[in-house]
Image (tube, rainbow, N blue to C red):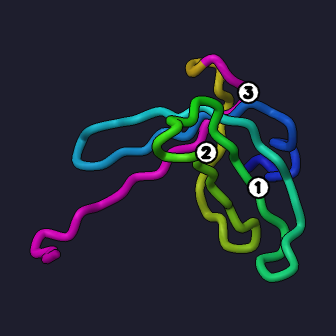
Amino acid sequence: MVNLSRLDGKSVALVLSLSGCEVVWLGTGSYQTDGTLGNVLRISFDEPNEADGRPELLIQESQWRGTIADGASHGCDYVTAITLTAEKNATQ
């Protein structure tokens, strides 16, 4: 298991999966201490769409149960993945 502090200043790929579709976002990690959340890894994504702003992801170290692996296959230092599941009977 990789300590999140090792990702500070490193390039990070986030692989998002939903219903068999994958999207990869590339960003840079910044390890920080938040007054409310404690230690967090903030991933700022490199290619923001002006209409969408500059997306970021916060990973709270005390709650993180995911894996972080070598990111060479994505052209970066590290990679992590998040799989989202859609509810079958979701209503809007």
At label 1, the amino acid type is Leu
Task: Judge from the rendering whether residue 28 lies leftward or rightward of residue 85; answer left or right.
Answer: right
Q: Which residue is mark 1?
A: 41
Q: Earlier in the sequence, mark 2 or mark 3?
A: 2
Q: Principal SS element in the magenta part?
A: loop
Within-10-Å neighbours for mark 2: few <14, some 14–19, many 20+:
few
- Look at 50% across and 35% down and name the residue there: 49
Q: Secondary structure at mark 1?
A: strand
Measure how far apart labels 2 and 3 are at the Cα level.
21 Å
Q: Secondary structure at mark 3?
A: loop
Q: Which residues are magenta?
A: 75-92
- Look at 47% across and 33% down and name the residue there: 24
Q: Which residue is mark 2?
A: 54
Q: Earlier in the sequence, mark 1 or mark 2?
A: 1
Residue 39 in which image quadrant: bottom right
Q: Closest to the observer: 74 or 37? A: 37
Within-10-Å neighbours for mark 3: few <14, some 14–19, many 20+:
some
Circle on res. 25 = none
Measure how far apart labels 3 and 1 are at the Cα level.
15 Å
Q: Which residue is mark 3?
A: 77
From what the image shows, is residue 21 above or below residue 56? above
From what the image shows, is residue 1 above or below residue 90? above
Residue 38 in which image quadrant: bottom right
At label 3, the amino acid type is Asp
Residue 27 in which image quadrant: top right
Q: Is residue 81 magenta?
A: yes
At label 2, the amino acid type is Arg
Measure how far apart labels 1 and 2 are at the Cα level.
16 Å
Q: Nearer the viewer, mark 2 or mark 3?
A: 2
The image shows residue 30 at horizontal and vertical percentages of: 82, 48
Task: Judge from the rendering whether residue 30 lies leftward or rightward of residue 82; answer left or right.
Answer: right
- Look at 61% across and 64% down and name the residue there: 65
